[in-house]
């Protein structure tokens, strides 16, 4: 009987439908998203993909994000259906515990993702020498460290940077494998300890699996994170309807990590913390 009871209470390892929550979706408000990414199109795509909860996480690259959130808030009340809608934001890390927009300026937001690797190599080079892997490694870690206690609830696609995988034409950038080799594990471990202490989540995203070396590095990091009790958010980083609810290779990453339902983060935790405070 005891064995049966323990089996019944054991958390379910996610082997099917791991993307019940897609907490990283961009609407047409984000310049990087397709104009077709309306709320109705997103909800239709989410329902077709079997997603129960969807989070709208736009960038503040245009003025009026708070106004856009108010519009979304009214629209989600009108379009209530099988898919629950969360209003989030993806804000760039711009300094020590500082995001591109103060969270206090977004009163209707349910949660915030901190993006620590959106680099403009052409107009604002993030490191003095683009071909130096040591400088890049330090910049990546510094931005991830600055994301902690920034007001964000989760960190979007850690260690992923589009500029490192697809350099702008005419720019020579250090190879990602060389950069990852320069990131020291003790520093990563210390960062994970601060993430755990802050109660932040780390995102599991298809972006983390677009490069074999990056996926391997993240898997080792996330195993340590799970040991520390850090939760994981799931997000497609969708910019067009067909991407909503799609984890791709990241599904296999979750299974290798042995992620269970208890390991997953939900915006309800952020809302609950706000009510308590």
Image (cartoon, rainbow, N blue to C red):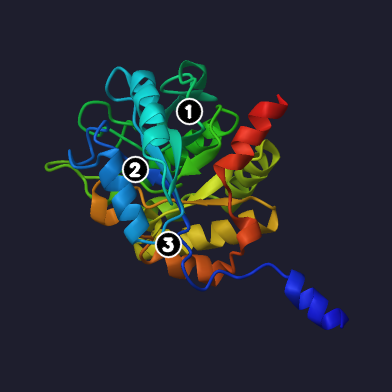
Q: Earlier in the sequence, mark 3 or mark 1?
A: 1
User: In this rendering, is residue 153 above or below 207?
Assistant: above
Mark 3 — residue?
215
Furthest residue to the right? 2
**Label ID, residue 132:** 2
Q: Is residue 35 left or right of residue 276?
A: left
Q: Which numbered disc flags the more N-terminal residue, 2 or 3?
A: 2
Position of the C terminus, as image quadrant, is: top right
Within 10 angstroms of label 1, few (less than 14), some, or many (20 or more) residues? many
- Binning the other alpha carbons within 10 Å of mark 2 as few (below 14), some (14 to 19) or many (20 upward) gives some
Dot 1 lies on which element? loop
Label 3 packing within 10 angstroms: few (<14), some (14-19), many (20+) = many
Q: Going 27% across and 22% down the picture, which residue do you hit? A: 62
Question: Looking at the picture, how far across and down is residue 218, in whole percent?
Answer: 49, 57
Mark 1 vs 2, N-terminal side: 1
Q: Examine the rendered structure and indicate whether residue 216 appears above or below residue 205.
A: below
- Which of the pair 52/32 is nearer the observer? 52
Q: Say which quarter of the image contains residue 273.
A: top right
Q: Residue at x 69, y 53 (%)?
A: 229
Q: Is residue 224 left or right of residue 137?
A: right
Q: Is residue 166 left or right of residue 103?
A: left
């Amino acid at each position: 009987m005891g064995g049966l009871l323990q089996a019944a209470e054991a958390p379910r390892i996610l082997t099917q439908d791991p993307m019940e929550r897609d907490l990283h979706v961009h609407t047409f408000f984000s310049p990087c998203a397709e104009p077709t990414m309306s709320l109705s199109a997103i909800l239709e795509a989410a329902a077709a993909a079997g997603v129960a909860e969807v989070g709208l996480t736009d960038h503040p690259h245009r003025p009026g994000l708070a106004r856009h959130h108010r519009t979304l808030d009214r629209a989600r009340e009108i379009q209530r259906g099988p898919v629950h809608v969360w209003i989030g934001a993806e804000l760039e890390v711009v300094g020590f515990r500082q995001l591109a927009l103060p969270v206090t300026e977004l009163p209707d937001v349910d949660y915030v993702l901190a993006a620590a690797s959106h680099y403009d190599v052409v107009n604002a080079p993030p490191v003095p020498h683009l071909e130096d892997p040591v400088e890049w490694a330090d910049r990546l870690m510094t931005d991830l460290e600055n994301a902690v206690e920034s007001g964000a609830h989760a960190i979007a696609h850690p260690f992923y940077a589009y500029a490192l995988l697809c350099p702008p034409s005419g720019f020579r950038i250090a190879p990602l494998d060389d950069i990852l080799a320069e990131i020291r594990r003790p520093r990563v471990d210390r960062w994970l300890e601060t993430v755990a202490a802050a109660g932040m989540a780390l995102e599991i995203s298809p972006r983390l699996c677009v490069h074999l070396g990056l996926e391997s590095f993240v898997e080792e990091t996330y195993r340590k994170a799970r040991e520390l009790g850090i939760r994981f958010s799931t997000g497609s980083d969708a910019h067009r309807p067909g991407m909503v609810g799609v984890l791709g290779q990241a599904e296999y990453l979750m299974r290798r990590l042995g992620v269970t339902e208890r390991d997953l983060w939900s915006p309800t935790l952020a809302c609950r913390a706000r009510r308590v405070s």
